[in-house]
């Protein structure tokens, strides 16, 4: 699998840039404000979460393209 991979929650409030099987960045819209979190998987539940995003995403995530991720970032960033 090539990285990065991109996903979003089906509700559209969080977008993910999966950098590797061990790390991802989440852009989360919280009360109209964009928050960014970088997660490095150091424990099994975090690695399982990334694995689910990569291979079993149908229930919670939609697969998106880099342009979708970047558009979300631009749209919700402070001017």
Image: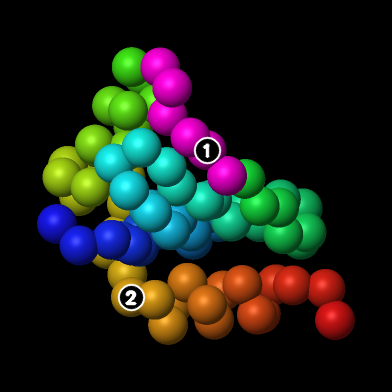
The label on residue 56 is none
Which is nearer the eye, 10 or 71? 71
Determine whether 42 is above or below 77 in the image: above
Q: Earlier in the sequence, mark 1 or mark 2?
A: 1
The residue wearing badge 2 is: 65
Instruction: Using residue 35 as the reference point, say whether residue 28 is left or right of it.
Output: left
Magenta span contains residue 31: no
Q: Dot 2, crowdedness within 10 Å: few (<14), some or many (≥20)?
A: some
- Displayed quadrant of residue 21: top left
The stretch in magenta equals 38-43
Determine whether 12 is above or below 35 in the image: below
The label on residue 39 is 1
Q: Residue at x 20, y 62 (%)?
A: 2
Q: Residue at x 32, y 28 (%)?
A: 47
Determine whether 72 is above or below 31 in the image: below
> Can see residue 11?
no
Instruction: Using residue 10 as the reference point, say whether residue 31 is left or right of it.
Output: right
> Can see residue 63?
yes
Question: What scheme was used to colour the molecule?
Answer: rainbow
Q: Position of residue 41 (x, y in %)?
A: 42, 29
Q: Residue at x 65, y 80 (%)?
A: 74
């Amino acid at each position: 699998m090539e990285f990065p991979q991109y996903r979003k929650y089906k509700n559209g409030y969080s977008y993910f840039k999966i950098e590797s099987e061990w790390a991802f960045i989440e852009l989360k819209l919280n009360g109209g404000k964009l928050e960014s979190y970088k997660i490095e998987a150091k424990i099994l539940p975090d690695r399982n979460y990334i694995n689910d995003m990569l291979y079993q995403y149908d229930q919670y995530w939609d697969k998106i393209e880099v342009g979708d991720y970047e558009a979300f970032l631009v749209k919700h960033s402070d001017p």
